[in-house]
Image: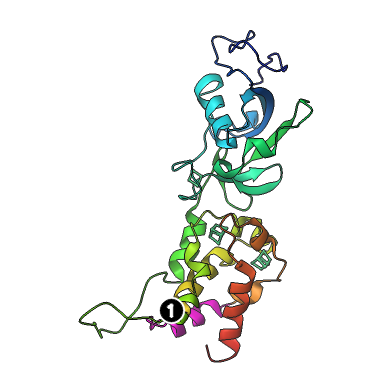
Amino acid sequence: MTTAVDTTKATDGRDPNSDNRPVPPGSTMVTLKIARFNPEDPDSAGWKEYEVPALPSDRLLNLLMYVKNYIDGSLAFRRSCAHGICGSDAMLINGVNRLACKVLMKDMLPKDGKSITITVAPLRGLPVEKDLYVDMEPFFKSYRDVMPYLITSGNQPTAERIQSQTDRARFDDTTKCILCACCTTSCPVFWADGSYFGPAAIVNAHRFIFDSRDEGAAERLEILNDAEGVWRCRTTFNCTDACPRGIQVTQAIQEVKRALLFAR
Ligand code: SF4
Ligand code: SF4
Ligand code: FES
C-alpha cells in the first residue's frame, strides 16, 4: 500500500491528508520504502512506500512502529528492547545491515529540509517469512553447533572459578555478541552457501575457546575445522563492518584459524 500525503514540514501537529494520524510539530516527512512479502499472497511482493513524520530524536524503529500503528498494521518485523541490546531488529537499511533501533534520524534527516527516502529490506541469506521477518533457525543452528557454553570435566570448585584479569581480557571482545545476525548475513560466503557456519557462530566459539576455565576448546576447534568451518572465510571484513557491537569479528576468526594451526 502506498499512502499519498503532504511531504512538507508539518507545523500544526496533524497530517491533513490522513485519517487522524498524529504528526508531531517540527517533524519532517520521510518516505520509507519497505520490501513487503506476504506468504499468503506471494504475487503481491514488492516495494511499498509510506510517508511518515520523523523527529531528530526518533530512531528508524520509531518510523516502522508508526507505519504499523497508523498506516498498515500488517507490516511484520521483530523488535524488543529498542536499545541495541536484544539484537532482534536487524535489517537491511539503505543497503547496510543495521539495528533499526540504533539508526538515529538526526543522522539521516537532511539539514536543508529536502525530502528523503529510506529503504528497508530483510536480512540477506535467511528465508523471509513475512516482510522484514526472517527465519533465524539456520543462524541459531550454527550457533548451537559450536557448543556456546562452558564445558568442564567435573572438577567443581568449592568457590567461584578464579580467572586472572589477563585471562578474562583474552576473550572480552567476543562476549559482547547479541546474536543479531548482522555479521553472518553480510557475509558473501554465507550468501553463496548457507551451510557455512558464519562469523557469529565463530565469534561465539571464540568466546569459549579462549576462556581459561573451559575444557571444550579442542572439540570446538575440531568442529570449526570442518569443510563449512573457519577455512571458508575469505577475510573480506564485511562482518566486522556490520557488527553493531563493534566486535572485531574478522580478527576473532583469524585467531581461531591460528589456534587450529598452532597450539592455542
Ligand atoms: S571476513 Fe570472513 S566471515 Fe567475515 S564477511 Fe568476510 S568472508 Fe565472511
Ligand atoms: S558478532 Fe556482532 S554482528 Fe555478529 S551476531 Fe554478534 S553482535 Fe551481531
Ligand atoms: S530492538 Fe533490541 S536491539 Fe533493537
Vertical position of residue 166 compared to residue 97: above or below: below
Please state the horizontal and vertical placement of residue 27, each as a whole percent of the image. 64, 22
Q: Residues within 10 Å of mark 1 (few under 14, many from 20)?
A: few
**Would residue 163 be seen by someone viewing this image from the given angle?**
yes
Ligand 2 closer than 8 Å to label 1 CB? no
Query: What residue is drawn where x is 64% and y is 40%?
Result: 121
Examine the structure image and report whether residue 223 is included in the region drawn in magenta.
Answer: yes
Classify residue 45 as left or right of residue 181.
Answer: right
Q: Secondary structure at mark 1?
A: helix
Please state the horizontal and vertical placement of residue 199, each as a whole percent of the image. 58, 66
Query: What residue is drawn where x is 27% and y is 77%?
Result: 160
**Would residue 198 be seen by someone viewing this image from the given angle?**
no
- Using the rendered view, name the quadrant where residue 120 is placed: top right
Examine the structure image and report whether residue 97 is included in the region drawn in magenta.
Answer: no
Query: What residue is drawn where x is 60% and y is 36%?
Result: 60
Vertical position of residue 147 compared to residue 96: above or below: below
- Using the rendered view, name the quadrant where residue 45 is placed: top right
The magenta segment is 211-226
Please state the horizontal and vertical placement of residue 42, each as a whole percent of the image. 60, 33
Query: Which amino acid type is shown beneath numbered disc 1?
Result: Gln
Vertical position of residue 41 compared to residue 235: above or below: above
Q: How is the image coloured?
A: rainbow
Q: Which one is in front, 246 or 48?
A: 246
Ligand 1 sits in which quadrant?
Answer: bottom right
The number of numbered discs placed on residues in the rendered structure image is 1
Please state the horizontal and vertical placement of residue 88, each as a whole percent of the image. 49, 47
Which residue is the site of mark 1? Answer: 165
